[in-house]
Amino acid sequence: MRPTLFLLSVLSGCLRSALAVWIDMEGLPDTGLNTSSWVTGVLPDLTTDIWDLNDMQIAAKNVLAPKYYASYRTGALNEFTYQANLNIYSKVRLNGFSFRDVSNMNVATTILGYNFSQPFFIAPAADAGHANKSAEASLAEAAGKAGILYAPSISSTLSIEKIAAAGQPGQVMFHQEYIWANKTRLVDELHRIKASGFKAIFLTVDNTGINGIRTRSMRFNDDTDTDTGHAANFDLQSLAAFRNLTTLPIVPKGIKTWQDARTCMELGFPAIYVSNHGGRVLDGAPTSVEVLMDIRQNAPEVFDNMEVYADGGVRRGTDAIILLALGARAVGLGRPAMFANIWGEPGVSRMISLFAQEFYTSLQLMGVSDVHALNTSYVNTNQIVPLTLS
Ligand SMILES: Cc1cc2nc3c(=O)[nH]c(=O)nc-3n(C[C@H](O)[C@H](O)[C@H](O)COP(=O)(O)O)c2cc1C
């Protein structure tokens, strides 16, 4: 090698190692991710470096402005619920049965009667534009290509109409809505959601009136505005009134107690969505694993009378299996899709395919050839303290 070339290559090596950063992995499972060659602010290679959803989170931490990473990552207060969401799955044991034919697998399912290729979906999350200028369009496109459900947030970067237009022909999407104090806004949005072709409403009921206090995010002067515009006086009467505002099926999102689950069943909702909002609202709220177990114990009829969806800390195919075995019909992914979106649609598509592969393989290893066969016989929850002590 000529001396100038040699000098240049030494210099570029020095520059790279000077720019390479140590990234705090936040206690995520150590699967050997090596970030030593990464450069702050530069997207890591999606196919050679990224092998699971946790890798995508670390990549997002490397690339996003700290303020935006914090806004996605933050939980409320001490983040006890955020951490519990991630850790609860390690307390559940999976029963894998041998002597089962798993050569023909079915993971496809229906959600509110619509066909989807997988029983997992992209949950509503605000401001996808902080990760990528394509914003929610990448999420809609990736979901459409994979045949999975996406339900955009009403606090999205793109408009209701633009997200609808980003979908594939015939793609079914649901839409999230908040209970705004401003009735005119509420009625207008519900009308636009229906007119744009969305098939159902995830009605978020866990932060009516007020948001959680998200310290991690507030340090960047984000989320300091406590006026969310949500109606704080939302009660059962208002819920009944809300149902007259749209003909779309309504799924209350943010159910955290068996009592509320049963109330929704008695009121005739077609489904509920068990969620603690990714630990961003009430710190100390139980995980979906605990809430599903509690519904099983106190109001098991809920599972016979309505569909139940659940989310929170789902990062591995096995996490989804646990929620499905406890009675969920479909499982949501919140932050992972936002982090994957740093690469735009290819990132979100890779997230879906990595997750789908973990899900499919783990089902095979458990001897489950049809996702609908999952039930509580496949999980051992002895390490989890029941919410309701008998
Ligand atoms: C950045 C971010 C924004 C969110 N925005 C909304 C929202 O606008 N509406 C809503 O109902 N839930 C919202 N959520 C909650 C998610 O729908 C979902 O319940 C939660 O993220 C699931 O937990 P996970 O992130 O651990 O997968 C948001 C979550 C995140 C991380």
Image (cartoon, grey):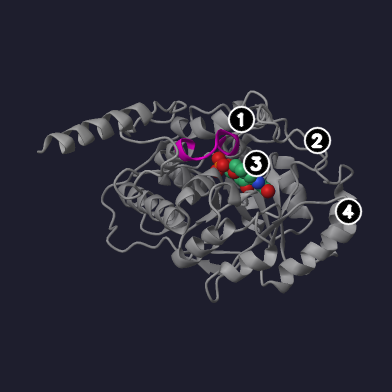
**Which mark is on residue 118?**
none
Name the element at disc 4. Answer: loop
Image coordinates for residue 313, horizontal then vertical, percent: 53, 39
Looking at the rendered structure, the kind of residue marked 3 is: His
Name the element at disc 3. Answer: helix
**Which mark is on residue 81?**
1
Looking at the rendered structure, the kind of residue marked 1 is: Thr
Of tags 1 and 4, the one toward the viewer is: 4
The part of the chain drawn in magenta is 61-69
Q: Which sits earlier in the primary sequence, circle 3 or circle 2? A: 2
**Which mark is on residue 182?**
4
Q: Which sits earlier in the primary sequence, circle 3 or circle 1? A: 1
Query: Is ligand 1 within 8 Å of the beta carbon of the residue shown at mark 3?
Result: yes
Of tags 3 and 4, the one toward the viewer is: 4
Which residue corresponds to mark 2?
Answer: 226
Name the element at disc 2. Answer: loop
